[in-house]
Amino acid sequence: MAKIGILTCSNATQDLGCSSVSCLADFRKRKGTFSEYPENEKLTLAGIINCPGCPTLTGSDKLIERIRALTDFGVDTIHFSFCLKSLCPFKEQYAKALKDSFPDISIVIGTHEEHVAPKEFRRRVKQLFCQPRKTMVDIILNKDEEG
């Protein structure tokens, strides 16, 4: 039996509203990277956890502590979500840190089937992040009304 945890991108989930629905659908249907498991092997999803964000001064330490919340419950494989695979410039660093800290777990880069090529996905996500956004300052200065 494979006991799986999924690591998602906190920018995608918290800022852009990704609900991991495609990851979960392909997990249930054994599509995407989940198709690589033998058909007769039972798959159990132990949990989904967000990346703590870009490493800054703490390096991978925060990530290791988050992943411990899954490994302490017997997870043997961590899947990096499609968002993390496509967007994260630190994914190789994170994968190495996890392998060094948890040598008995497998790291799989990816989850669901690609609905859009990673380069196009990055371009479109960048557009989402770069949209003009109104803030409380706009209300205070009466700049929040159209026209």
Image (cartoon, rainbow, N blue to C red):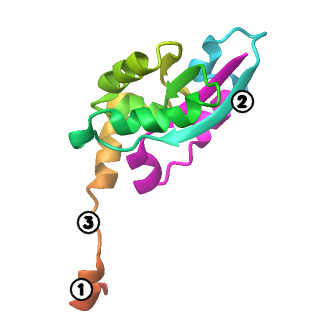
Q: What residue type is labelled 3?
A: Pro
Residue holding disc 2: 28
Q: Which of marks 2 and 1 is nearer the N terminus?
A: 2
Seen from the viewer's position, the closer of residues 6 and 72 is 72
**Magenta stretch bounds:** 1-27
The quarter of the displayed image where residue 86 is located: top left
Distance, label 2 to label 3, CA atoms, is 37 Å
The quarter of the displayed image where residue 61 is located: top left
Neighbor class of circle 1 (other Cα within 10 Å; few <14, some 14-19, many 20+) is few
Distance, label 2 to label 1, CA atoms, is 47 Å
Marks 2/1 in contact by CB < 8 Å: the verdict is no
Q: Residue 106, relative to residue 115: is it above or below?
A: above
Q: What residue type is labelled 2?
A: Arg
Name the spot of residue 93 as percent of width and height, x first: 30, 24
Residue holding disc 1: 143
Seen from the viewer's position, the closer of residues 53 and 57 is 57
The answer to whether residue 147 shows anywhere in this view is no
Name the spot of residue 127 as percent of width and height, x first: 30, 50
Q: Tell me what residue is drawn at x 34 percent, y 44 percent.
A: 53
Mark 2 lies on a secondary structure that is helix
